[in-house]
Amino acid sequence: MMRNNYEENGLDSLTVSENKCTWGGPWTQTKLETFEKYVNAYLTIMNKHRDKYDWKLIYFDGFAGSGTRDQEKENPSELLKDLFHEGLDKEDLSVYKGAAERVLSIKQRGFDDYYFIDSNKAASDKLKEKLKDFESPDRKMFFINKDANEAISNFADKLDKHRNYTSLVLLDPFGMQLDWDSIKRLARPHTDLWILIPTGVIVNRLLDKKGELMYENKLKSFFGLSMEQIKAYFYQRTNDQTLFGEEERIIKVQKPIERIAELYIERLKELFSEVSDKPLVMYNSCNTPIFHFVFASNNQTAKNIAQDIVGKMKRRKN
């Protein structure tokens, strides 16, 4: 049974315990495999043209973490304090943050620069140590300890100054740390974006059944919408006849998790011309959607490749 604990400190101290449902472990692995396959395809295409057009390829990971697979040293309650989830299996956690090593291990000419962002210096230092064997003269790695929104803003400024930069961005936060303004800064012709949306595991829980929203500022910054717009999308008003006359009631829409993903995709389409309509969906053991992994770009070929990879991953699961 779900248990919500609302403590005095507000959003950061909200936790959710799910004793009967855990993450669907294979899906965390599938997410990483999906991304790795896309990176491989991306580099295959870009390597054919990068020298001719003097492109500089940039990889940007906004939530790089420590990259560790040492289960005994992980502290899920600390790492997931923004996830509001105490029931995450350690095996799932161990594969969740493995993107950096996978990208660097690809057996073809890679990116020119790699940016690994994490607000936790200890985690960043640990990742730097883990990846030191991948260093080479033609591969620059930058480990930056900043809030992801600040780091994205600085990165976008750099892209504005260097028009030959072509970037692939991975944003897979555990929670709702990303502001919509940060996503807007990344919307440019030569940037491909993969973003993990915490549809079921967090956002849906902030949209309570009666529409008495406790964390309005977080929802507004996440969607980039006003509360009136958010409520209109997720709630309906209905009039019920009672013994005392007609009574107005606010009810939450059906299939809210799917609606969250649909809204976020609609918002992405306002910024990018090519957005995946059928993202990779990650489920817990009760078959409830908890994340949607979405691709956005301004290149139709890139979207077609991403959609093809996701489709194959879904068929493999089935």
Image (tube, helix red, strand yellow):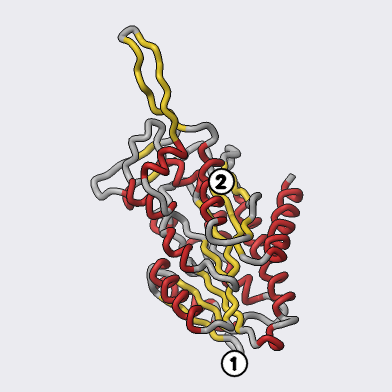
Crowding at dot 2, Cα within 10 Å, few <14 / some 14-19 / many 20+, comes out as some
Q: Name the element at disc 2.
A: helix
**Residue nearest the viewer, comparing 164 with 44:** 164
In the rendered image, is residue 306 in sight?
A: yes
In the rendered image, is residue 64 in sight?
A: no
Question: What's under tag 1, amino acid-wise?
Answer: Pro
Horizontal and vertical percent position of residue 211: 37, 34
Which residue is tagged 2? 262
| Residue at the (56%, 51%) spot, across then down | 265
Quadrant of the rendering where the C terminus is positioned: top right
Which residue is tagged 1? 137
Horizontal and vertical percent position of residue 62: 48, 68
Quadrant of the rendering where the N terminus is positioned: top left
Horizontal and vertical percent position of residue 127: 49, 74
| Residue at the (61%, 59%) spot, across then down | 295
Question: What's under tag 2, amino acid-wise?
Answer: Glu
* Mark found first going from the N terminus, 1 or 2: 1
